[in-house]
Image (cartoon, grey):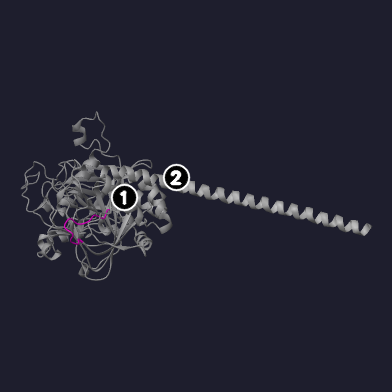
Amino acid sequence: MMIAIITIFSLIAAASSARVFPQRTSDEAAVIEWGHSAIISALDGAVATFGPQTSMGANFEVETAPVLANPIDGVGKRDNKSTTDGDDIVSDLELPKLINADEVEGNMVIMTDAAGLSGVAMARIAKESGAAALMVVNTDQNAGDYIYSLEVESEEEAKYAEENIDIPVVMVSLQAGNVITTAMATDDMDPSVVNKGGALPDRVRLYAGGDRPFFEDAVSKNPVVYLIHNMLTSEECDDLISMAKGKYDKVDDTTGINNYLENTIASDNGEALAKNIDRVMLWKGGLAGKLIKDIDERISQVTGFPPEHFSDFQINKYEEASSHEPHFDINPANGIMASITIFLNDVPQEQGGEFVFPKPEDRDDEPVVISPTKGLAVVHHNTDEAYNFDKSTLHQEAVLNGGFKYIAKKYVFLNPQPNHMRIVLPLMALPFGGKLPRVFITLQNALIDKFGLETAELYFQKATTMIPVLILIAIAQMVSNFVQNKLKKEKDEAGKKGKDAKVGKSKKSKAKSKKTD
């Protein structure tokens, strides 16, 4: 398929027309947790810019019961222009406390933003109702998992918040709100009980997220794109770069030759899409050490993707003038359900190298631009809910204007990876530090040319599975030959010693005979 070249400059010519990420930081990341040691459930929250902050440590933490506000949005059906006493309301900062304030007192109150109240206005209602903390649910149906830090909206609010708001205020997504309000629901529970908070956990704990991975929603649909902050630690990023050092090959996608095994597919028209990019696939599979195993386990826990569907890490190195033009993550030999791209180093804004979705279909075709941030993962789904290819997943990497950029890509396949991919090929790559000898790629391509993709894969799987058997047979033969040669040598040496002893005895007998004479 022909893909028009889209430059980063045309995408973000008007800064207001592009969505730039990441927008969240670890400083405003909070966790709402419940459960016991065997089963722990947790939600991501974004801390408001007013009130207690995560930097306050224990003074930020709250452990208490969650309670649904009544009315749930802080306003309900009552007249916004007057209080329950009939007095006129001049601003949202004069709204009365909640109807169930007695139940709310000392607990975490859950409210929605459906009434359009500001964060400070909702915090005031919670505070006046005696709440120990406020959880605000973002009810925007089109926002997906998007959350943000609530901010003051006027000088009046800023002054009020500074003087009065001393309870933590966090926002969670609509999906997260549904999760916590149905946490204890059973199949036979009346929906009206759930709607009144009857299925909430008994107690929750609110604390700072710190270095814990947390989500940031970028595109809710067409395509699904989200970020995971702190996916890798700084040390893990450095270790992956070190593992790839000295093993790179320059990507050439103009030859018409596909590398299906390592997900490097040739361009359709012979023009280079991957420009000045060095790449290596680190084949570890089932033979991976603690570093890779820990990372795969964390990715699986955070994303929900089963590790059996993961590819090994593909490490890409970019230098000045490197770029990757608009393309799709497609592998005809192995369907890619999702792609996980992790930045292994920070790239200053002036050096470019952004990860870009030029034409998402969720909001007026506004491009999504993601700046390379060390340890940050970008997850995008390549298929829709029916596992059909999603054409809106077109993405690119902008020109790097200086320095270096390293990324680690992990592909999530539709089907679990067979043993020859997880055991045999990593075993063949083991003597080379994880780099697979080119002969296997050549073999697979030759089989595909002769038999086609589906049949060739069966032959390739059989051929590669037989390799360890042949190696074991060869080793066994070598050992057998070694043992036989050693035994023969020992037998020959024993025979020679016996012959020498016999000759010596004969000479001694003759000498004795001469002495007698």
Q: Main secondary structure of the magenta part?
A: loop
Residue 324 falls in which quadrant of the image?
A: bottom left
Helix, strand or loop under label 1: helix
> Is residue 206 visible in this depiction of the protein?
no
Between the residue at mark 2 and the residue at mark 1, the CA separation in whole angstroms equals 19 Å
Residue 309 x/y as whole percent: 31, 45
Give the residue furthest to the top: 188
| Residue 126: mark in rendering | none
Residue where numbered disc 1 is placed: 444
Question: Decide: marks 2, 1 in contact (CB < 8 A)?
Answer: no
Q: Going by the image, does 57 lie left or right of 427?
A: left
Residue 193 falls in which quadrant of the image?
A: top left
Q: Going by the image, does 244 lie left or right of 509?
A: left
**Residue 269 highlighted magenta (yes or no):** yes
Helix, strand or loop under label 2: helix
**Residue 416 highlighted magenta (yes or no):** no
Which residues lie in the magenta part?
Answer: 263-273
Label 2 amino acid?
Val
Instruction: Compare residues 455 and 47 and report the one nearer the observer.
Output: 455
Q: How crowded is mark 1: few (under 14 residues within 10 Å), some or many (20 or more)?
A: many
| Residue 469: mark in rendering | 2
